[in-house]
Amino acid sequence: MTVPQRVAIVTGGSQGIGRQIVKRLAADGYAVVLNYATSKVEAEQTVAEIAAAGGDAVAVQADVADEFAVARLFDTAEQTYGGIDVVVNSAGIVVHAPIVELDLADLDRVHRTNVRGTFVVDQQAARRVRPGGAIINISSTTPKLSLPTYSAYAASKAAVDAITLILARELGERDITVNAVAPGATATALFLDGKDEQAVARMAAMSPMNRLGEPADTADVVAFLASPAGRWINGQVLYVNGGAA
């Protein structure tokens, strides 16, 4: 009997950790719907690379905080591939500033993408993911590190953790797992932007392994949670940070 191809949606899939997740799931045999907000060129390049390697992927633009755009994203996945098995919430933004200086417009912008965006995507996923599927939210180690200038971002990721744990309880009887993966400092453009060598070295030294994470470190854990091997892990926040604390 032929096993049907599993289908994954990955938001924020054109760059950084999200892009690595897209490529890993495609390599594992998933048909992948790569969502992007503005990085159309990078998204199409990623799809082309997957196709060249024999995989199956499409790129779809959507603002994750826009419920109508997200509904169309899920419609596209169902119309193109017949259903949805895995949803990975990787879209996110960060703004750095001390609390006393943080522009409230920036606070709203971070929370619109990271909190509302996660909620909107999870809501559609809860309605559409097939039994035996997985919802995986990308969180962060920052809520437990209390790093200065990270208040808006850390608060948004703490909200992601809460959404994850509650949704896991709500969907358990449908045989859908819901987990969060919380990377530590990872060598992506989002993390490295604006940091000098000394700042990067300080962040790397927070791990006993004395290095930054790589996007593949997170993608490997996501792929495990999406696979049959990860079915008994549910309602968890998994820290992928080399032991940073």
Image: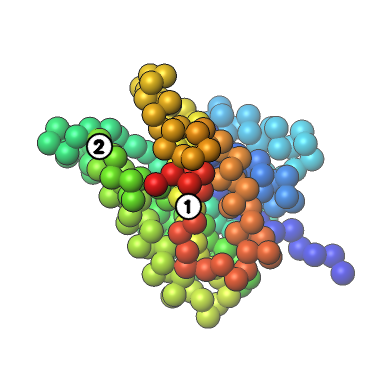
Q: Position of residue 177 (x, y in %)?
A: 54, 68
3D distance between C-alphas at marks 1 and 2 = 20 Å
- Amino acid type for the residue under numbered disc 2: Pro
| Sooner in the amino-acid sequence: mark 1 or mark 2 | 2
- Residue occupying the far right of the picture: 1
Asked if one can make out residue 68 in the rendered structure from this viewpoint, the answer is no
Q: Which residue is mark 2?
A: 148
Q: Position of residue 119 (x, y in %)?
A: 38, 58
Q: How many marks?
A: 2
Q: Image height check: is 214 above or below 124? A: above
Secondary structure type for disc 2 = loop
Image point (58%, 52%), residue name: 222
Image point (74%, 58%), residue name: 5
Residue 123 falls in image quadrant: bottom left
- Residue occupying the far left of the picture: 100
Q: Nearer the viewer, residue 99 or 20?
A: 99
Could you tell me which quadrant the N terminus lies in?
Answer: bottom right
Q: Nearer the viewer, residue 74 or 110?
A: 110
Q: Name the side, left or right, on which 158 lies relative to 125.
A: left
Image point (37%, 56%), residue name: 160
Image point (47%, 28%), residue name: 189
Q: Image height check: is 225 above or below 59? A: below
Secondary structure type for disc 1 = strand
- Amino acid type for the residue under numbered disc 1: Tyr
Q: Name the side, left or right, on which 194 lies relative to 22.
A: left
Q: Nearer the viewer, residue 119 or 201?
A: 201
- Residue occupying the far bottom of the picture: 173
Q: Which residue is mark 1?
A: 239
